[in-house]
Amino acid sequence: MQHRHALPAPVLWSRSDDVLRLHRLAHSGGSAALLEWLAARLGGWTGVVDTVEARGPGLAVRAAAEMNARGVRSAVLHGGGSVALLFALEGGRALAAVLEQQHHPGAPALLADAAVPLALVLRAEEAGRREERAALAEARAREAVLHLLMNGRLSTAHQIAEALGPSLPEPMRMYVVECRTGSRAEVTRLCEELTGGQAWIVRCPVYVRHLIVFVPAGLAAAAADHDPLATALVGAARDCAVGVSGELFLREAPAAYGQAFHALAVARGREERHARFGPGPELALAAHGAGAGWAEALLAPLHAYEPRRPQDPGAQELRATAHAWLNFTSHATRLLKIHRNTLAGRLRLIEAVLGLELARLADQAALSLALRLTPGGVRRGGGADPGRGPAAVPQGSEAADPPKAPEPRAALDEVLRDPRLTAWARAHLGPLSGAGAPPGARATVRTWLDHDGQLVPTAAALGISVPGARKRLTRIEAVLERSLLQCPSTRHDLWLAHRAEELAG
């Protein structure tokens, strides 16, 4: 416990005033304020020592050991021109003061009076710390459930969610709520109240202003333009915005998150500050028939990868790293709980294993599609993907010699020539040529994709400033109802759509 030295105590004391001051300090400033005032009042050192493992001035340590050995509630020990006064507290601790031999005669009584409020405030502070630890543990457990859902580990996710409460809703709509960090507790309380405690809520591990809410489909509004829950959330917190997914099942949690995230980008620009994901074909559904075999072949070297050392990342961790980076870029370090250098090392290893160049948008798009078409992930002996979570991700990134991807790799172009992908691409890109599109929308997006989604070279190619390029893309976000600048998966889908359209001729 912190201790203080101060000037000698005054001569005239009022015990009643001092007792009142002690209780006020305990209530307003806690143990630290109380001990600081005692040190100033007594003109010496004050603190809390453990009677078993005493730490502090030598005289106080010896006095604590003596008090513990004799089993008494108070002790006085003289030595070296000083005196140590101790009064027992709860839990094997004692309030101690080390003063001059000629200290104020009222010092023992003041310490005895201080022991009662100090014991109470110490108990309250410990309860508060326990509550904080419990809240942190629950938050991390909820984050682990989110990781499991995103990796298809539904059974384990259900087990943990049942212990935390409530049950995970099925089917559901996902709400991504953006609000100030200071209002997240109020937004959480409101979600629980408006859904009768049936919403499953988790703080986003990547974006500190986001809450992710799984709402039972039966409680979510059927009409996109009338959503009482979203309206109430927006009205409850200033600067709040809400994106809502379509009605999906828990196994589709990654798609639901993507939909809600895109809807959030649209909601920011609307007066009502909430939006639901617009209708349209999903890429993974359109490409599944033609692309499942291609995806398995592309990812086979990654799924078969074996690290050289047990502490190095294996196939599961590398797949999780690729998925996190493709969706969150540098923010993936928050999701995976790893250092940025570890992330960079893993990405280099993934490139070597798969024979890709992840700085190129084309290779990012190919890997993103392949991961979405193989939701089962790494399989060994017919088992399902064990999934990932922050605690399961090792910190090292030493690589074994990676197996080489088969050459030639199954051509992505053959997948994109499928008529179902052509139809998806035209529907996906259609708004860029619609009546509400800003002038040159297609050319802007095409240039942006040609420069790997980087704003600086895009602005140079368009002959405008970087803020000007950003404004153009922001206007296009409203037309596409997708987040271009904050959601990398949009770039991947747009690149694939443009390539499919080109191949269709």
Image (cartoon, rainbow, N blue to C red):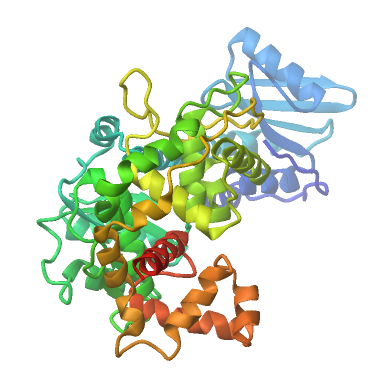
The image shows residue 346 at horizontal and vertical percentages of 60, 39
Residue drawn at (35%, 43%) of the image: 150
Closer to us: 397 or 453: 453
Residue drawn at (28%, 68%) of the image: 233
The image shows residue 8 at horizontal and vertical percentages of 82, 46
Residue drawn at (17%, 72%) of the image: 224
Quarter of the image with the C terminus in it: bottom left
The image shows residue 344 at horizontal and vertical percentages of 65, 44
Lateral position of residue 415 relative to residue 81, left or right: left
Height in image: 253 above or below 473?
Answer: above
The image shows residue 485 at horizontal and vertical percentages of 49, 70
Closer to us: 313 or 2: 313
Closer to us: 310 or 225: 310
Q: Is residue 27 visible?
A: no
Q: How many marks?
A: 0
Residue drawn at (45%, 70%) of the image: 484
Lateral position of residue 280 relative to residue 360, left or right: left
